[in-house]
Amino acid sequence: MRARGIRSGIIIGGNPDYNDDVSWTRAGLEQLKSLAANPSTAPEDVIIQSWQPLPTHYLPETTTGTTTWMLLEAEKTLR
């Protein structure tokens, strides 16, 4: 795809086995870090999505475990 100029992306989320915001968001970020560590699987685009009631808060972005915190951490991972 990259050779043809097609962007790739992934949807990340936490682990359904976790029942707290911090563990859930960290699990999703570990998924992203694993993919980003390999140039052939590193995504250009990331969507953070949940089909679960976690994380329970979107804000503030300075609090570990919130959706916006996870977004900022994902951005750091992809730099």
Image (cartoon, grey):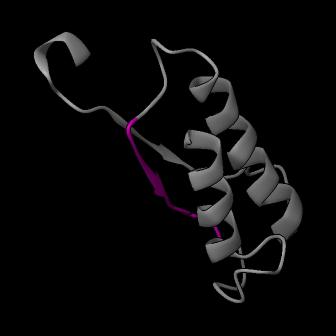
Where residue 56 sits: x, y (%)? 72, 82
Question: Is residue 40 inside the magenta stretch?
Answer: no
**Residue drawn at point x = 58 percent, y = 15 percent:** 38
Residue 13 shows in this picture: no
Using residue 68 as the reference point, say whether residue 63 is left or right of it: right
Can you say which quadrant of the picture contains the C terminus?
top right
- When asked about the image quadrant of residue 24, the answer is bottom right
In this orientation, does residue 17 appear? yes
Residue 59: x and y in percent read 68, 88
Residue 32 point in image, percent of width and height: 62, 37
Total marks shown come to 0
9 relative position to 11: left or right = left
Question: Which residue is located at x 73 percent, y 76 percent?
Answer: 66
Q: x, y percentage for residue 62?
A: 78, 81
Res 45 quadrant in image? top left
Q: Nearer the viewer, residue 56 or 72?
A: 72
Residue stretch rendered in magenta on the structure: 44-52
Q: Quadrant of the N terminus?
A: top left
- Residue 36: quarter of image: top right
- Residue placed most toward the observer, 58 or 36: 36
